[in-house]
Image (cartoon, rainbow, N blue to C red):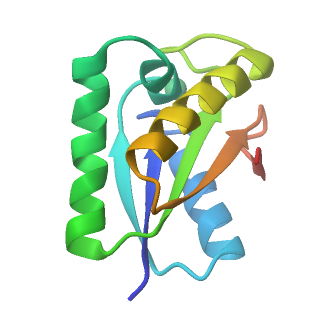
Amino acid sequence: MTFCASIQCIDGRIHDAIFSYIKGNYDIKYIDIISEPGIDGILAGDDQAYIDLIFRKLQICVDVHAVKEVFLSAHHNCLANPGEKPEHMVQMNRSMEKLKEHFPELIFHKIWIDENWVCSSAD
Ligand SMILES: [Zn+2]
């Protein structure tokens, strides 16, 4: 049983795409979801209490499912965190710095979901 965690927006348009992408490209059987509206913006921002809550959720995935690989995504037309792809990429990079600092033992990947609801690697 191989679990990963997906840190992603709540937007219902992205879930199928993320699942297909991860399962199609990685040896992963189950995907734990950590979801908040516009989550890349939250992680990149300065609401530390909110960020700590997300970190706590990820820690549970690590503790109970031995998660070693984590996918952070951002998507086109995010209504909770509006912005074009370049802005989301900046936010994902900031998010990634914080995640890697807090969870140095984990492997992280970035995913962008485009206007056709198709995922691509943003690593
Ligand atoms: Zn969104």
Res 113 → quadrant = top right
The mark tally for this picture is 0
* Residue 97 to residue 102: above or below: above
Res 39 → quadrant = top left
Residue drawn at 69 percent across, 21 percent down: 90
Q: Relative to 20, is 58 on the left or the right?
A: left
Residue 8 seen in this snapshot: no
Task: Residue at the far bottom: name it.
Answer: 1
Residue 74 seen in this snapshot: yes
From the top left corner, tell me how far across and down residue 8 is, in percent.
47, 41
Q: Quadrant of the N terminus?
A: bottom left
Q: Relative to 122, is 38 on the left or the right?
A: left
From the top left corner, tell me how far across and down residue 2 is, in percent.
43, 83
Q: Relative to 121, is 31 on the left or the right?
A: left
Residue drawn at 71 percent across, 73 percent down: 25
Q: Relative to 114, is 109 on the left or the right?
A: left
* Residue 10 to residue 56: above or below: above
* Residue 86 to residue 99: above or below: above
Residue drawn at 60 percent across, 10 percent down: 82
Q: Nearer the viewer, residue 60 or 24?
A: 60
Q: Nearer the viewer, residue 92 or 8?
A: 92
From the top left corner, tell me how far across and down residue 107 is, in percent.
56, 62
Residue drawn at 50 percent across, 20 percent down: 44
From the top left corner, tell me how far across and down residue 59 is, in percent.
26, 54
Q: Nearer the viewer, residue 95 or 84?
A: 95
